[in-house]
Image (cartoon, rainbow, N blue to C red):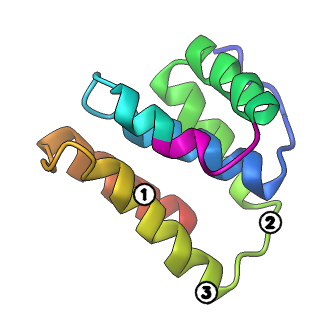
């Protein structure tokens, strides 16, 4: 595994997690990507998307876990972020088994 310690800002971490959510069913759609892009500037999105594209699922989860520990999220931030995650999951009006599985994993890491 090539995972190395990489510190992200809160925004970068959130974008990375949302990309993982969009890819949970192995089918990230243009609509999902458009929603994620709306959460940040293009430069940050491109940087994080490239990194995400180069990582395996295990590497992604490890990087998320490493970076979650670096930041303190308020309850309000977590509630808002939960809404963003759900918005990505439900963009296609379905909540697949793989998305539910990832949702539980993220709950264990983030909360």
Q: Residues within 10 Å of mark 3 (few under 14, many from 20)?
A: few
Q: Which residues are magenta?
A: 35-41
Looking at the picture, does residue 44 appear above or below residue 100?
Answer: above
Q: Residue furthest bottom?
A: 75
Mark 3 vs 2, N-terminal side = 2
> Observer-nearest residue: 21 or 33?
33
* Quadrant holding the N terminus: top right
Looking at the picture, does residue 31 appear above or below residue 26?
Answer: below
**Residue drawn at 69 percent across, 20 percent down:** 51
Q: Is residue 18 magenta?
A: no
Query: Are the two marked residues, 3 and 2, in contact with CB atoms closer than 8 angstroms?
Result: no
Per the image, the residue denoted by label 1 is 85
Percent position of residue 92, x then y: 20, 42
Mark 2 vs 1, N-terminal side = 2
Q: Which mark is residue 71?
A: 2
Q: How far apart are labels 3 and 1 at the CA level? A: 14 Å
Q: How far apart are labels 2 and 1 at the CA level? A: 18 Å
Percent position of residue 88, x then y: 37, 49
Per the image, the residue denoted by label 3 is 76
Count of numbered badges drawn on the protein: 3
Q: How far apart are labels 3 and 2 at the CA level? A: 14 Å
Helix, strand or loop at label 2? It is loop
Q: Would residue 87 be seen by someone viewing this image from the given angle?
A: yes
Give the side of residue 91 with respect to residue 13, left or right: left
């Amino acid at each position: 595994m090539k995972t190395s310690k990489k510190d992200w800002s809160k925004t970068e971490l959130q974008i990375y997690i949302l990309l993982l959510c969009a890819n949970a069913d192995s089918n990230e759609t243009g609509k999902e990507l458009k929603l994620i892009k709306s959460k940040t500037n293009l430069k940050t999105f491109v940087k994080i998307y490239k990194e995400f594209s180069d990582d395996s699922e295990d590497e992604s989860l490890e990087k998320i876990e490493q970076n979650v520990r670096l930041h303190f999220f308020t309850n309000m931030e977590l509630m808002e972020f939960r809404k963003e995650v759900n918005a990505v999951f439900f963009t296609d009006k379905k909540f697949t088994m793989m998305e539910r599985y990832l949702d539980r994993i993220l709950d264990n890491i983030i909360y």
